[in-house]
Image (tube, rainbow, N blue to C red):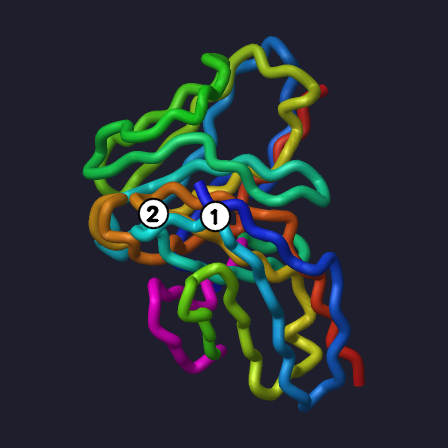
Amino acid sequence: DTEVTQTPKHLVMGMTNKKSLKCEQHMGHRAMYWYKQKAKKPPELMFVYSYEKLSINESVPSRFSPECPNSSLLNLHLHALQPEDSALYLCASSQGGRGSNQPQHFGDGTRLSIL
Amino acid sequence: DAKTTQPTSMDCAEGRAANLPCNHSTISGNEYVYWYRQIHSQGPQYIIHGLKNNETNEMASLIITEDRKSSTLILPHATLRDTAVYYCLGGSYGKLTFGQGTILTVHP
């Protein structure tokens, strides 16, 4: 069982829809992350939040909009996605800020399909 | 960011030690070596990490060469449940770069 909870587990949406992915952790971690994983490929870092502030944006298209409302929650807002955005979206968290080099703990992801 | 090179796949007999190598010759001085594994349809699971010294925990041991250009993950007694993709990563300040990983298959 993972201590990082992601909802929903599966999401199907059209290219004109707006939806959000949610990630929650109650381990007191102060760094949170979004990754994208295509089938049979390794995860790729998208965003890093450290102490609730955006710290890293890996040149992600603006149709993906992250939000960190508080230290336990991380959202990823989706708008006008393309079929190639279909993937597994993984959330992770780590103790301390991103500079602590503590290991990241991952959720089981949201599997997103764009029609 | 450190680039890592791992064998595409490896086999191991159940009950035997699995030794997974990783080359990270471009790793910088402040980058840690992390190992994760991923079982189908689950998120990556943290195994172990280290900077310079060898490390051991309840899951595995990590042997890092003195020049830090390579490392080996050791699963001392592999079970069928250890079948997974194993990723070796270099990273620091929260930025992890996953390589292609090694598919480890443990067979009876």
The answer to whether residue B56 is magenta is yes
Is residue A40 depicted above or below B9 in this figure? above
Are the residues flagged by discs 1 and 2 from a single subunit?
Answer: yes
Residue B55: which quarter of the image? bottom left
**Label 2, on which residue?**
B92
> Relative to A23, is B73 on the left or the right?
right
Is residue A30 depicted above or below A103 in this figure? above
Report the span colored magenta.
B44-60
Q: Nearer the viewer, residue B104 or A5?
A: B104
Q: Where residue A102 sits: x, y (%)?
A: 30, 57
| Numbered tag placed on residue B77 in the rendering | none
Q: Where residue A13 sits: x, y (%)?
A: 63, 22
Name the subunit of mark 1. B
The answer to whether residue A17 is magenta is no
Sooner in the amino-acid sequence: mark 1 or mark 2: 1
Q: CA distance from mark 1 to mark 2?
A: 13 Å
Q: Nearer the viewer, residue B37 or B20?
A: B20
Kind of element beneath mark 1: loop
> Relative to A80, is A54 on the left or the right?
left
Residue at 29% over, 53% down: A101
**Label 1, on which residue?**
B26
Residue at 64% over, 57% down: B6
> Relative to A22, is A12 on the left or the right?
right
